[in-house]
């Protein structure tokens, strides 16, 4: 996650030329994030490993067609999600994007190092988040927890940046209300 | 408000940073921002997963698999790049070499003289022209080709010599190949160079130089000249052939037309058969299908030939003399042995010839056909087929043609006596001695006072174009009754019901009428003679109507207040059921008078009104399944407002008919959407704004505002909109969520 946009673009350009070193840097840069996200979606360490590995391999195999104007991360996430979906299809398990995200969010929050945060606050936030719609949860978590930029969110969610901003605003406003509600002990 | 916006923007742009002082100050006094900042910081702090603390990594097998994939992909990409580079390099080298070679060849081809100051290109072009000029037989007139026998030199001269210069040139050089002569003519036409100058080059096969002299482009001239001579060359297998030919006989029964061009007949359809007459020349376009020559088009002849027919008075080696023509006719051996001529000619034979006059005032026969000598005859018979230029008589195996363009008016089944010339296979009518109309078939059209005359006049009475027949005229009887007009509104088993209120028994009319027909008739005692009847086109209409009155014959008149029109209805049952009704039906309209043919009338208060969503189209445009379990039936008279389709909400006024709701009036409801977003562009003058979602929303006078907010850039709004002509129009706008009453699809 330490790559700047410029560095990322240079790496992609090198990778497109067949530079294995550049590919390896990309792989190592996003390995943990994608694995973590895959685990959130699949809820199974083995499946997560397979899905993430397939996502990386698909990404590298098609890197010559990758548009350098786009950031890598949303694409990797999207590929990973598609791989997970196709895996679920093979296993005859239907999963909606909302479900995936729900699992992901909850899994992620369960991974939180509770030393860094008060148990009460975690519980409060979990409750408040649960009161939001899946779309609202998704946009907030990707923005705050996964540090997605507005552009990344626009690419990932396939919506205009203006819509990302307005959704973010509304979701945050709603979350604030829900947190207040939870603090007062209502809304459940 | 502005500061709140700035807070929002800052939070959006700096999700991971601690709050600056101005925000901290602001949230002291703004509870809304305070809540948002708290939740944001909660979320922010809730992101404790740092890469170092995570335990996520691939298993060694998968790690190796991914690295292997990276290596393989890398190799593949490198190889493809190498090949691409090489290809570009080779292509580049190859391209330069090829270009150089082409330039060299072109230079040699066009610029460098190789022999006698001629370049390779000029030599090649001259050779091509030479080859073309050495095939003199390939140039001929179309008639010559199709007849194969005519004196084509004369034909060629006739075609070639349009000016004096051409004539002089042709006669002084007529030994040369025709292609060469055509080349001179062609170049002469294209430039100012004289025929003689061009001919000097062409004679020595220096066509390249001739074209250069004429200052014309080489290749283009070659192409144009090729197509110039091609249009006078008929190649085997050409789909269409066009030529002038004189008709020698026509057989209406078989559609066969014999001409002086082909021995085999040409075949024509009914339309073309209408146009042809023996001994006239036409320009035919013929297509050969399965060895049969079919005429596909007929036109005026291109050449105005003179034609003659008569007995041969004398036949010499090169000339013939015809009875009635004072001069000898030059005839080439080819024409004499033409297949249409059948045999060697002998004195006394009856022939048909086409002749053309040469510049030396010599008459040349261009076609010659031997015919059966016609004999004068008088024939009588019943006409079984009528054509524009002739007819066919019953039991006589020949076709009859009028010799004069003014033809008498004859009809099928007339019995006709004609005088004319019998050519064996056809008959040329010179005089019509009598026409007796076929009375039995026509007596329906005569009045009762008409006295039948079936006798065929023995003396000639026909003098075209005036026809004199002793039969009385069918219209204008001596005791003429006044004409009356009416419209048939209804019919039952025994009677007609007219718009005037009259009722007429069917047996008083000589012919049957249909409802909606406008008639003009004469009444005489108990008989009614219809002089004229017609009916306008029917149309489906809907009117709000009021009952006006009932005529003595039971016909009801309804008044449509919206346009003042009147609807005449035969045997309606609505008059008693209320004053105002809706009329839907199929009518024949004469101005503001509408005669109802099929209809329904109903009072809106008696209809069932429901609103439902269409869930399925059972039968295209007529049967729909509704979400309330009903089946909606739409018929020809249903008034539909909007486009009924699956997913649309419809308001239906109709009546139940065996579990099916027959829709009398179906209105498709407006599609309502709820939209929300920040205004990113606001046009106050044109009354529209653009939401950050990219949707443009129009405001109009009827838009309802819920709340006290203002519209402007950066303001967040909630809108209830509907689609109108592809544009979103706001019916309601609010600044707070849930302030707009009603629901709709959320997008």
Image (tube, rainbow, N blue to C red):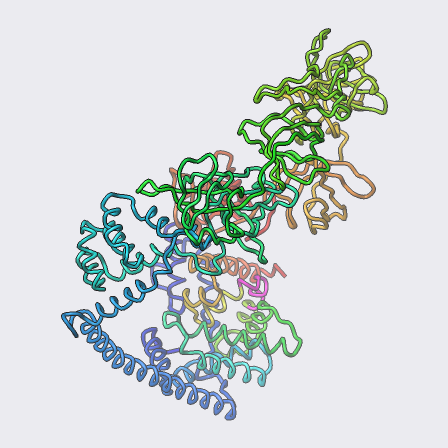
Query: Is residue B718 at all visible to an observer of this figure?
Result: no
Q: To which quarter of the image does residue B553 belong?
A: top right
User: Whole-percent x and y of residue B640?
Assistant: 65, 38
Which residue is at 28% across, 60% downward? B222
A94, above or below B323, in the image:
below
User: Whole-percent x and y of residue A155?
Assistant: 45, 66
User: Whole-percent x and y of residue B361?
Assistant: 33, 40
Taking depth in this image into account, of B338 and B134 the one nearest to the observer is: B338
Which residue is at 46% across, 87% downward? B69
List the single residue furthest toward the left.
B117
The secondary structure making up most of the magenta span is helix
Quadrant holding the C terminus of chain A: bottom right
A27, above or below A141, in the image:
below
In the image, is residue B100 part of the stretch drawn in magenta? Answer: no
B547, above or below B524, in the image:
below
Which residue is at 43% across, 53% downward? B333
Quadrant holding the N terminus of chain A: bottom left
Residue segment shown in magenta = A126-136
Number of marks: 0
B112, above or below B725, in the image:
below
Q: Is residue B389 left or right of residue B679?
A: right
User: Whole-percent x and y of residue B25?
Assistant: 36, 57
List the single residue furthest toward the top.
B479
Q: Is residue B121 left or right of residue B463?
A: left
Taking depth in this image into account, of B446 and B382 the one nearest to the observer is: B382
List the single residue furthest toward the right.
B494
């Amino acid at each position: 996650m330490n790559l700047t946009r410029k560095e990322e673009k240079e790496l992609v350009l090198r990778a497109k030329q067949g530079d294995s070193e550049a590919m390896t840097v990309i792989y190592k840069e996003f390995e943990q994030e994608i694995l973590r996200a895959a685990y959130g979606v699949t809820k199974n360490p083995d499946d997560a490993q397979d899905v993430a590995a397939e996502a990386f391999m698909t990404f590298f195999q098609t890197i010559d067609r990758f548009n350098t104007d786009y950031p890598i991360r949303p694409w990797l996430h999207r590929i990973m999600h598609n791989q997970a979906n196709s895996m679920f299809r093979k296993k005859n398990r239907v999963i909606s994007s909302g479900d995936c995200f729900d699992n992901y969010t909850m899994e992620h929050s369960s991974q939180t190092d509770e030393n860094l945060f008060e148990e009460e606050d975690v519980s409060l936030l979990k409750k408040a988040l649960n009161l939001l719609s899946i779309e609202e949860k998704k946009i907030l978590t990707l923005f705050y927890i996964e540090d997605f930029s507005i552009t990344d969110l626009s690419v990932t969610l396939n919506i205009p940046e203006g819509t990302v901003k307005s959704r973010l605003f509304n979701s945050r406003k709603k979350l604030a209300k829900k947190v207040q509600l939870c603090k007062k002990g209502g809304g459940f | 408000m502005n500061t709140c916006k700035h807070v929002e923007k800052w939070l959006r742009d700096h999700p991971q940073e601690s709050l600056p002082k101005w925000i901290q100050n602001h949230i002291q006094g703004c509870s809304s921002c305070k809540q948002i900042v708290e939740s944001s910081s909660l979320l922010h702090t809730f992101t404790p997963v740092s890469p170092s603390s995570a335990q996520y990594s691939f298993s060694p097998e998968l790690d190796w698999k991914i690295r292997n994939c990276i290596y393989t992909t890398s190799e593949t990409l490198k190889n493809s790049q190498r090949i691409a580079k090489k290809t570009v390099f080779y292509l580049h080298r190859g391209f330069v070499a090829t270009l150089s070679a082409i330039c060299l060849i072109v230079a040699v081809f066009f610029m460098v003289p190789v022999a006698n100051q001629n370049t390779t290109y000029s030599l090649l072009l001259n050779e091509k022209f030479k080859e073309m000029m050495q095939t003199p037989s390939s140039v001929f007139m179309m008639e010559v080709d199709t007849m194969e026998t005519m004196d084509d030199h004369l034909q060629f001269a006739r075609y070639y010599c349009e000016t004096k210069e051409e004539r002089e040139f042709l006669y002084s050089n007529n030994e040369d190949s025709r292609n060469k002569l055509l080349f001179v003519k062609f170049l002469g036409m294209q430039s100012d160079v004289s025929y003689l100058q061009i001919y000097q080059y062409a004679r020595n096969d220096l066509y390249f130089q001739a074209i250069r002299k004429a200052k014309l482009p080489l290749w283009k001239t070659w192409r144009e000249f090729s197509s110039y001579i091609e249009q006078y060359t008929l190649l085997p297998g050409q789909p269409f052939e066009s030529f002038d030919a004189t008709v020698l006989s026509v057989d209406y029964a078989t559609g066969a037309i014999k001409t002086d061009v082909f021995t085999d007949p040409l075949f024509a359809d009914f339309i073309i058969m209408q146009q042809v007459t023996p001994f006239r020349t036409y320009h035919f376009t013929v297509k050969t299908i399965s060895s049969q020559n079919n005429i596909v088009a007929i036109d005026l002849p291109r050449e105005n030939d003179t034609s003659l027919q008569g007995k041969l008075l004398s036949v010499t080696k090169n000339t013939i003399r015809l009875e009635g023509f004072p001069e000898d006719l030059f005839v080439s051996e080819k024409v004499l042995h033409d297949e249409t001529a059948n045999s060697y000619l002998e004195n006394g034979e009856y022939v048909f010839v086409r002749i053309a006059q040469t510049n030396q005032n010599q008459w040349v026969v261009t076609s010659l056909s031997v015919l059966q000598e016609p004999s004068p005859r008088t024939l009588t018979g019943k006409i079984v087929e009528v054509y524009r230029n002739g007819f066919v008589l019953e039991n006589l195996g020949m076709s009859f043609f009028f010799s004069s363009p003014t033809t008498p008016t004859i009809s099928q089944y007339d019995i006709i006596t004609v005088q004319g010339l019998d050519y064996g296979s056809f008959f040329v009518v010179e005089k019509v001695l009598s026409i007796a109309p076929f009375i039995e078939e026509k007596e329906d059209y005569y009045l009762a006072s008409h006295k039948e005359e079936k006798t065929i006049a023995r003396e000639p009475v026909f003098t075209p174009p005036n026809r004199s027949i002793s039969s009385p005229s069918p219209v204008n009887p001596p005791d003429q009754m006044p004409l009356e007009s009416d419209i048939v509104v209804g019919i039952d088993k025994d009677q007609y019901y007219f718009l005037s209120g009259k009722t007429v028994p069917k047996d008083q009319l000589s012919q049957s009428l249909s409802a909606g027909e406008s008639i003009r008739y004469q009444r005489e005692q108990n008989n009614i003679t219809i002089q004229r009847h017609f009916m306008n086109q029917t149309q489906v209409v809907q009117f709000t109507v009021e009952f006006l009155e009932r005529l003595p014959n039971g016909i009801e008149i309804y008044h449509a207040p919206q346009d003042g029109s009147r609807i005449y209805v035969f045997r309606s049952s609505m008059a008693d059921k209320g004053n105002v009704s809706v009329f839907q039906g199929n009518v024949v309209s004469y101005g503001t008078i509408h005669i109802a043919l099929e209809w329904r009338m109903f009072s809106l208060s008696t209809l069932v009104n429901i609103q439902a969503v269409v869930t399925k189209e059972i039968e295209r445009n007529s049967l729909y399944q509704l979400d309330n379990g009903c089946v909606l039936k739409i018929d020809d008279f249903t008034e539909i407002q909007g486009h009924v389709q699956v997913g649309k909400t419809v308001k239906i006024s109709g009546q139940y008919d065996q579990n099916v709701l027959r829709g009398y009036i179906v209105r498709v409801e407006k599609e309502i959407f709820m939209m929300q977003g920040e205004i990113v562009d606001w046009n106050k003058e044109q009354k529209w704004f653009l939401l950050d979602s990219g949707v443009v929303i129009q405001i109009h006078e009827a838009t309802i505002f819920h709340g006290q907010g203002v519209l402007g850039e950066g303001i967040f709004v909630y809108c209830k909109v509907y689609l109108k002509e592809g544009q979103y129009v706001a019916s309601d706008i609010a600044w707070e969520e849930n302030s707009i009453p009603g629901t709709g699809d959320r997008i």
